[in-house]
Amino acid sequence: MTRLTFLISRGLKWRILAPSLCTSVLLAAAAITPAAVAAPSAAQPREVARNDTLIVSGFGPGLTEIQDPGNMNPYSLGSLGRVRDILNKTIYEFLYLYNHNTGEEIPWLAESYTVAPDLQSVDVTLRNGVEWSDGQPFTSDDVKFTLELLRDTPSLVFASDIKEWVRDVTVSDPQHFRINLNKPNARFFYFYFVENSEIHLPIVPRHVWQGQDPATFTNLDIAAGWPVGTGPYKLVDASAQQQLFDRNDNWWAAKTGFQNLPKPLRVIFMQPGAADTAAARTINNEFDAGAVMQPGVFEAARARNPNITSWNTQGPSWGAPDACLYTLGLNTRWGPMADLRVRRAVQHSINRQSMVDLAYESATVPQVIPFSTYGGLAAYQNQLTDLLDSYKPDDPDPAKVASDMQEAGYSRDSAGFWAKDSARITTDLLTPGWLKPMGPVLEKQLRDNGFDVTFKLFDPDTQPFFDIVRAGNANIWIIVHCGSSREPYGTLQHFHSRFASPAQGQLNSYLWANSQYMNPEYDAIINQMDAIQPSPTDAQYMDLTRKATNIFLRDVVEMTLAEERHVVTFNNTYWTGWMNSSNAYAAPYSLWAPFLLSLLRLEPGPGA
Amino acid sequence: MTLGYVARRVGVFFLVVFFAVSINFLIPRLRPTNPIAARMYEFAASGAGRAGDFRELIAIYNEKFGLDKPLWQQYITYWGDVLRFDLGTSISFYPGLVRDEIMRAAPWTIGLLAVSTLLAFTIGSLLGALLAWPRTGRVFSIFVPLLMTLSAIPYYLLGLVLVYLFALVWPVLPSSSAYTSGARLTLSWPMVVDILRHAILPAASIILAVIGFWGLGMRAMMITTMGEDYMIMAQAKGLRGRTIFFDYALRNALLPQVTGLAISLAGIMSGAILVEIVFGYPGIGFLLYRAISSNDYFVIQGVVFFVILSVGLALLILDLVYPLLDPRIQFRRS
């Protein structure tokens, strides 16, 4: 021991100074052991020049970014993030695509569909010549396999939907099939197979998936050509940092003349890093698309790199709508907000423009009814302006607040807050983390008008927020109401009593419909709308829309505040032809399937 | 050092691991959140909640992950798995195994943080020792305020400043990622260079931020050591300055630093969360951040388990090695 101690003491300084550096080198070598970090893959991908490569950053930190390089299953737990970020514009195509800006339905893998008059079935015709990436034909049997797999496998995402609606699929021939429904649904096909933004139901190849456990099948074997899809790209490498897709020069659409091959030979999806880092990378031309920026950051980035653009060419509202509305939720059934006069007073307390200016740097626009500004909805909204003039929902006025509250039996207490029978309206203003900019602003506006509310944030864990709100235990909350992108019914139906909780304390049946509104008159209107196809020129549909909107405004069922808009950025250095407000061929969100259209329209930019 | 002492230390090690692993099991479960439900709500929050009633799906996966069982049953199952080094299945990466995810991320973090920690320790300790050494030139005194300033700045902020300076204003280094986009990992010299280039900014942010910690600590220890009798004795004996510096001052002042180094190296397994987020670095810190964000109990438990094990082992090794480093340390009962 003494000898050992002696040796250690003599060599101490060298162990301190130099060998640590040697250890560093060894550890650095360990860090770059490719076998330890790389996903299973085939041969080395070919070299592709930067100017032939499109680099897309993830939409932002959270679920919908590259997250799982070892799994390409579009239906197992966690699948939707995978589909929306990387798979829905590379590997998988959909029966239809949709232009949210115009409401145009774009036939893609399917040529047409017809909803039966009794709304109990949908006949679909597939496009001729569609092939999987392994050369097998894409047929009606693949659709039948996919839908019935979902129907029969409860552990898959969307299984409960398909089980609720789909009885079975009848195949007539490889190009024709009928989806038989369990009950009438005028919008089933549109909802699940056309819009393809929030919901994605990719058809999977029966010849690959049959016999697999669909809940644990990873759908990834690059050497075998998996994942097999019909899309214009094939996966060639996947790691935690990036996923590489190379163009499939045998893409069916190019062979049949339906589309030209996309110009980018390779598409790379990258982890964006922190918001500031992602902005720096976009400025440095490292990202071509996808980085979402705050308006101020976007303006700074644009000043450094004029090739950076977003949806609008003029600010401050640079961003694009996404069919969601910033909303102040009110519990219309229990608590102080159940009194319509109190809800009206709350409405008169809110200054929407001020909220937009302070919380979102004027980057969006106030809205008063829960409909997006998307073109498909404009034709309906234009016929409702007289209702807005009549109800004037955007009318901040302290005198009207006082009038409504006094009518409801309230008076100001010694601290200036509204109280009835010595009981003050004291409540939390519940706010999920991603909507926190609005919280302090609305709290201030409400407190200034005598409501003793306190902003309460749920971040990052929003489950308690939803549990409280869905059970009818909240009085007032901030939320986005993501409704329809093409017709009023999609949003108005959320105020039907079928979405109300069975009793206070019990969860309701739908995450985004929490007003707890119960009105048989309103229910009857929605029931009639259920059974008809939407059209702004259909007198019956428009009459029902007016009646429902009238009740929504009259009863202040919830308060629509402003439109949610995201400043999605594009870099025109290497690629041009991006969608924007004057070339609105698709919505600009890389999460949505129609983003494929941009890949097909891109042309080399000035930096190429 | 007696056998009894070694046995006691090993016993304490197992006790610490037992309690820490138990706490590691309990803490995520004290939250009212169900991780499967939270996962579904996150999808909903990202806009995917238009369709579907998640309740059936939540029930199915609660059963698959054993989250429907009473806590004591989960605890027993958990210990059974831990003893077999089975860290379970990730919720976020389902059906991927937690162990695989950690192994995938660990090389990046170990490479980045081990190198950064060792470099910061070496440079910082040497600098601190020189700052206290009377024969060091006066010019060195400027390092004191510099080190104090750097040690007060969080490393992720330094990271953002470095990105601004060296990736935007003077674009000589990549701003983020572990290697160039489009490149594929191979064991080749260009790839090694590429990885090292990408590691420079994140490593620099860590080194600059912690070098002050090591330097100022070492300086204080050196000042204490300089007043010791054996230092005066060494000078009286006419020993060379370099010998006194390394063998008498540095060696004796270094012991607390070595303890700190061991704990820092052991803590590497938890990653540098903020640095990895800022630089989009695919290491354990980023993995842990995502696991916490998505309530992935099993990944959180897996990462923390490795941290517990490595810190416990580091402290055990230190306890056993101390008498070898410094013969004055005795482990006998008084």
Image: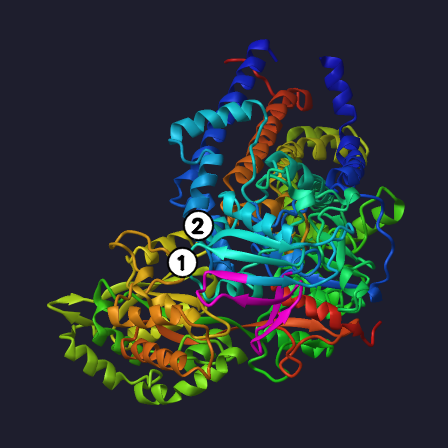
Residues marked 2 and 1 touching at CB (< 8 Å):
yes
Tell me the element at label 1. loop
Q: Residue at x 56, y 36 (%)?
A: B89
| Residue B109 visible, this orientation | no
Q: Report which residue position mark 1 lands on.
A: A511
Q: Residue furthest left?
A: A421
Q: Determine which quarter of the picture holds residue A450.
A: bottom left
Pick the residue in front: A134 or A266: A134
Given the image, on which type of amino acid does mark 1 rest? Leu
Q: Residue at x 76, y 57 (%)?
A: A233
- Residue A404: % across, % down: 20, 80
- Residue A548: % across, % down: 33, 76
Q: Report which residue position mark 2 lands on.
A: B54
| Residue B27 visible, this orientation | yes
Q: Residue at x 58, y 76 (%)?
A: A319
- Residue A268: % across, % down: 74, 58
- Residue A481: % across, % down: 43, 68
Pick the residue in front: A509 or B99: A509
Label 2, label 1: how many angstroms apart (C-alpha)? 9 Å
Which class describes the residues within 10 Å of circle 2: few (<14), some (14-19), or many (20+)?
A: many
The span shown in magenta is A94-122
Q: Quadrant of the N terminus of chain B?
A: top right
Left or right: A193 as drawn, with respect to A267:
left
